[in-house]
Amino acid sequence: MPESSEFIVPPCHDAVRLLYEDEQLLAVDKPAGLLSVPGRHPANRDCLITRLQQDYPSARIVHRLDMATSGLMLIALNPDSHRALSRLFEQRQIHKEYHAVVAGQIAAHEGVIDLPLACDWPRRPRQHINFGHGKPAQTHYRRLDTSATQSRLLLTPYTGRSHQLRVHCASLGHPILGCEFYADASTRNASPRLLLHASALQLLHPVSGEALSLHCEPPF
Protein backbone atom coordinates (compact mmCIF):
# COMPACT_ATOMS: atom_id res chain seq x y z
CA MET A 1 0.00 0.00 0.00
CA PRO A 2 1.62 3.31 -1.03
CA GLU A 3 2.28 5.69 1.86
CA SER A 4 0.18 8.53 0.45
CA SER A 5 -2.68 10.60 1.76
CA GLU A 6 -4.57 9.72 -1.44
CA PHE A 7 -5.01 6.09 -0.38
CA ILE A 8 -6.94 4.50 2.46
CA VAL A 9 -4.51 2.50 4.57
CA PRO A 10 -5.57 -0.84 6.06
CA PRO A 11 -6.51 -0.68 9.75
CA CYS A 12 -3.77 -1.48 12.25
CA HIS A 13 -5.04 -3.47 15.22
CA ASP A 14 -1.71 -3.78 17.05
CA ALA A 15 -1.32 -1.68 20.19
CA VAL A 16 1.24 1.05 20.79
CA ARG A 17 3.60 0.00 23.61
CA LEU A 18 4.81 2.57 26.13
CA LEU A 19 8.51 2.02 26.86
CA TYR A 20 9.48 5.13 28.82
CA GLU A 21 7.67 8.09 30.38
CA ASP A 22 8.57 11.20 32.33
CA GLU A 23 7.15 14.72 32.53
CA GLN A 24 8.93 15.79 29.34
CA LEU A 25 8.67 12.93 26.88
CA LEU A 26 7.48 9.46 25.99
CA ALA A 27 9.27 6.66 24.20
CA VAL A 28 6.93 4.24 22.44
CA ASP A 29 7.07 1.22 20.17
CA LYS A 30 5.08 1.97 17.02
CA PRO A 31 3.69 -1.17 15.37
CA ALA A 32 4.24 -1.80 11.68
CA GLY A 33 1.27 -0.69 9.61
CA LEU A 34 0.39 2.33 11.74
CA LEU A 35 0.85 5.87 10.42
CA SER A 36 2.89 8.25 12.59
CA VAL A 37 0.55 11.19 11.86
CA PRO A 38 -2.91 11.38 10.26
CA GLY A 39 -3.21 11.15 6.50
CA ARG A 40 -5.21 13.76 4.59
CA HIS A 41 -7.89 11.24 3.71
CA PRO A 42 -10.58 11.25 6.45
CA ALA A 43 -10.33 7.47 6.72
CA ASN A 44 -6.66 7.75 7.72
CA ARG A 45 -7.19 9.48 11.06
CA ASP A 46 -5.98 6.53 13.12
CA CYS A 47 -2.27 6.96 13.77
CA LEU A 48 0.31 6.95 16.53
CA ILE A 49 -0.15 10.54 17.68
CA THR A 50 -3.97 10.49 17.72
CA ARG A 51 -3.90 7.32 19.80
CA LEU A 52 -1.43 8.81 22.26
CA GLN A 53 -3.32 12.08 22.56
CA GLN A 54 -6.29 10.21 24.01
CA ASP A 55 -4.23 9.72 27.20
CA TYR A 56 -1.66 12.51 26.71
CA PRO A 57 -3.49 15.49 25.17
CA SER A 58 -0.30 17.58 24.98
CA ALA A 59 1.67 14.92 23.07
CA ARG A 60 3.43 16.19 19.95
CA ILE A 61 5.32 14.40 17.19
CA VAL A 62 9.08 15.07 17.03
CA HIS A 63 10.09 12.66 14.25
CA ARG A 64 8.44 9.98 12.15
CA LEU A 65 8.79 6.40 11.07
CA ASP A 66 7.37 5.09 7.80
CA MET A 67 4.03 3.37 8.20
CA ALA A 68 5.64 0.01 7.34
CA THR A 69 8.50 0.44 9.85
CA SER A 70 8.08 -0.51 13.49
CA GLY A 71 9.96 0.55 16.57
CA LEU A 72 11.12 3.35 18.81
CA MET A 73 9.72 6.86 18.55
CA LEU A 74 10.11 9.83 20.88
CA ILE A 75 7.09 11.99 21.71
CA ALA A 76 7.31 15.43 23.32
CA LEU A 77 4.86 16.29 26.10
CA ASN A 78 5.24 20.08 26.12
CA PRO A 79 6.48 22.87 23.82
CA ASP A 80 9.87 23.15 25.54
CA SER A 81 10.69 19.45 25.17
CA HIS A 82 9.39 19.54 21.60
CA ARG A 83 11.81 22.34 20.71
CA ALA A 84 14.70 20.67 22.51
CA LEU A 85 14.15 17.24 20.98
CA SER A 86 13.64 18.73 17.51
CA ARG A 87 16.95 20.54 17.89
CA LEU A 88 18.73 17.32 18.88
CA PHE A 89 17.41 15.57 15.76
CA GLU A 90 18.29 18.52 13.52
CA GLN A 91 21.83 18.64 14.92
CA ARG A 92 22.19 14.85 14.60
CA GLN A 93 22.84 14.45 18.30
CA ILE A 94 20.57 11.43 18.66
CA HIS A 95 22.15 8.06 17.91
CA LYS A 96 19.73 5.78 16.05
CA GLU A 97 19.95 2.05 15.36
CA TYR A 98 17.73 -0.18 13.25
CA HIS A 99 17.50 -3.91 12.69
CA ALA A 100 16.77 -5.15 9.17
CA VAL A 101 16.60 -8.46 7.38
CA VAL A 102 17.72 -8.21 3.77
CA ALA A 103 17.77 -10.56 0.82
CA GLY A 104 20.90 -12.54 0.08
CA GLN A 105 24.20 -13.18 1.79
CA ILE A 106 26.23 -10.04 2.51
CA ALA A 107 29.91 -10.83 2.33
CA ALA A 108 31.30 -7.77 4.15
CA HIS A 109 31.13 -7.73 7.93
CA GLU A 110 30.48 -3.98 7.94
CA GLY A 111 30.67 -0.91 5.77
CA VAL A 112 29.40 2.60 5.08
CA ILE A 113 26.96 3.50 2.30
CA ASP A 114 27.46 7.10 1.19
CA LEU A 115 24.98 7.85 -1.58
CA PRO A 116 22.93 11.08 -1.98
CA LEU A 117 19.16 10.78 -2.13
CA ALA A 118 16.41 12.79 -3.80
CA CYS A 119 12.68 12.34 -4.30
CA ASP A 120 11.78 10.40 -7.42
CA TRP A 121 8.93 12.80 -8.21
CA PRO A 122 7.21 10.83 -10.98
CA ARG A 123 7.03 7.84 -8.61
CA ARG A 124 6.78 9.56 -5.22
CA PRO A 125 7.00 8.71 -2.37
CA ARG A 126 9.89 6.73 -3.81
CA GLN A 127 13.39 8.15 -3.44
CA HIS A 128 16.39 7.51 -5.67
CA ILE A 129 20.14 7.99 -5.74
CA ASN A 130 20.88 11.32 -7.37
CA PHE A 131 24.45 12.66 -7.54
CA GLY A 132 23.34 15.91 -9.18
CA HIS A 133 20.58 17.08 -6.89
CA GLY A 134 20.42 14.60 -4.02
CA LYS A 135 21.01 15.43 -0.37
CA PRO A 136 23.93 13.73 1.42
CA ALA A 137 22.99 10.43 3.04
CA GLN A 138 25.22 8.04 4.97
CA THR A 139 24.42 4.71 6.60
CA HIS A 140 26.73 2.40 8.52
CA TYR A 141 25.84 -1.28 8.41
CA ARG A 142 27.09 -4.25 10.40
CA ARG A 143 26.23 -7.85 9.61
CA LEU A 144 24.77 -9.62 12.64
CA ASP A 145 23.92 -12.94 11.01
CA THR A 146 23.71 -14.41 7.55
CA SER A 147 22.48 -17.49 5.72
CA ALA A 148 22.41 -18.58 2.12
CA THR A 149 19.23 -16.58 1.46
CA GLN A 150 19.19 -13.62 3.84
CA SER A 151 21.23 -11.45 6.21
CA ARG A 152 20.37 -9.61 9.43
CA LEU A 153 21.90 -6.15 9.68
CA LEU A 154 22.35 -3.47 12.32
CA LEU A 155 21.91 -0.14 10.52
CA THR A 156 23.09 3.18 11.90
CA PRO A 157 21.98 6.17 9.81
CA TYR A 158 24.14 9.27 10.14
CA THR A 159 21.48 11.26 8.27
CA GLY A 160 17.70 10.96 8.29
CA ARG A 161 16.54 11.08 4.69
CA SER A 162 13.19 9.66 3.64
CA HIS A 163 13.46 5.93 2.82
CA GLN A 164 17.22 6.16 3.38
CA LEU A 165 17.70 2.68 4.82
CA ARG A 166 15.51 1.04 2.20
CA VAL A 167 17.32 2.69 -0.73
CA HIS A 168 20.78 2.17 0.73
CA CYS A 169 20.20 -1.53 1.37
CA ALA A 170 18.80 -1.94 -2.14
CA SER A 171 21.87 -0.14 -3.52
CA LEU A 172 24.02 -2.96 -2.12
CA GLY A 173 21.92 -5.45 -4.08
CA HIS A 174 20.30 -6.60 -0.83
CA PRO A 175 16.82 -5.02 -0.48
CA ILE A 176 14.92 -5.34 2.79
CA LEU A 177 12.47 -8.23 2.90
CA GLY A 178 8.86 -7.11 2.48
CA CYS A 179 9.78 -3.76 0.91
CA GLU A 180 7.11 -2.74 -1.58
CA PHE A 181 9.11 0.09 -3.13
CA TYR A 182 12.66 -1.13 -3.75
CA ALA A 183 12.55 -4.94 -3.79
CA ASP A 184 11.84 -7.43 -6.56
CA ALA A 185 8.69 -9.52 -6.33
CA SER A 186 10.29 -12.51 -4.59
CA THR A 187 11.95 -10.33 -1.92
CA ARG A 188 8.80 -8.25 -1.50
CA ASN A 189 6.70 -11.39 -0.98
CA ALA A 190 9.23 -13.04 1.34
CA SER A 191 7.65 -11.30 4.35
CA PRO A 192 4.12 -10.04 5.07
CA ARG A 193 5.67 -6.86 6.52
CA LEU A 194 8.75 -4.72 5.99
CA LEU A 195 11.51 -6.23 8.12
CA LEU A 196 12.85 -2.91 9.37
CA HIS A 197 12.66 -1.91 13.03
CA ALA A 198 13.94 1.10 14.98
CA SER A 199 15.65 -0.71 17.84
CA ALA A 200 17.67 1.89 19.80
CA LEU A 201 17.90 5.61 20.53
CA GLN A 202 20.63 7.25 22.59
CA LEU A 203 20.48 10.92 23.55
CA LEU A 204 20.94 13.46 26.32
CA HIS A 205 17.67 14.15 28.09
CA PRO A 206 16.39 17.56 26.88
CA VAL A 207 15.88 18.86 30.44
CA SER A 208 18.10 16.92 32.86
CA GLY A 209 20.97 16.43 30.42
CA GLU A 210 21.40 12.87 31.65
CA ALA A 211 22.24 10.13 29.16
CA LEU A 212 19.12 8.29 28.00
CA SER A 213 19.55 4.93 26.30
CA LEU A 214 16.36 3.35 24.94
CA HIS A 215 16.06 -0.10 23.42
CA CYS A 216 13.27 -2.02 21.69
CA GLU A 217 13.93 -5.52 20.42
CA PRO A 218 12.68 -6.29 16.90
CA PRO A 219 9.64 -8.55 16.69
CA PHE A 220 11.13 -10.54 13.81
Image (cartoon, rainbow, N blue to C red):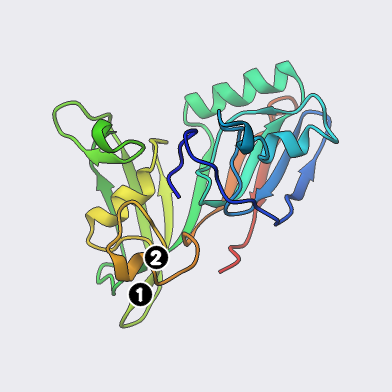
Could you tell me residue 16's position as x and y percent?
A: 73, 50
Q: Nearer the viewer, mark 1 or mark 2?
A: 2
Q: Please, what secondary structure does the residue beneath circle 1 have? A: strand
User: In this view of the protein, which residue sits in the foreground, 12 or 57?
Assistant: 12
Could you tell me residue 19's position as x and y percent?
A: 75, 50
* Residue visible at 63% across and 37% down in the picture: 43
Above or below, comparing residue 28 to residue 207 in the picture:
below
Mark 1 to mark 2 CA distance (whole Å):
9 Å
The kind of residue on which mark 2 rests is Leu
Disc 1 crowd, CA 10 A, few/some/many (<14, 14-19, 20+): some
* Residue visible at 48% across and 24% down in the picture: 90
User: In this view of the protein, which residue sits in the foreground, 57 or 216?
Assistant: 57
- Mark earlier in primary sequence (1, 2): 1
Could you tell me residue 132's position as x and y percent?
A: 14, 28
Q: Which residue is mark 2?
A: 177
Above or below, comparing residue 154 to residue 30 in the picture:
below
User: In this view of the protein, which residue sits in the foreground, 126 or 61?
Assistant: 126
Q: Mark number for residue 123?
A: none
Q: Mark number for residue 150?
A: 1
Disc 2 crowd, CA 10 A, few/some/many (<14, 14-19, 20+): many
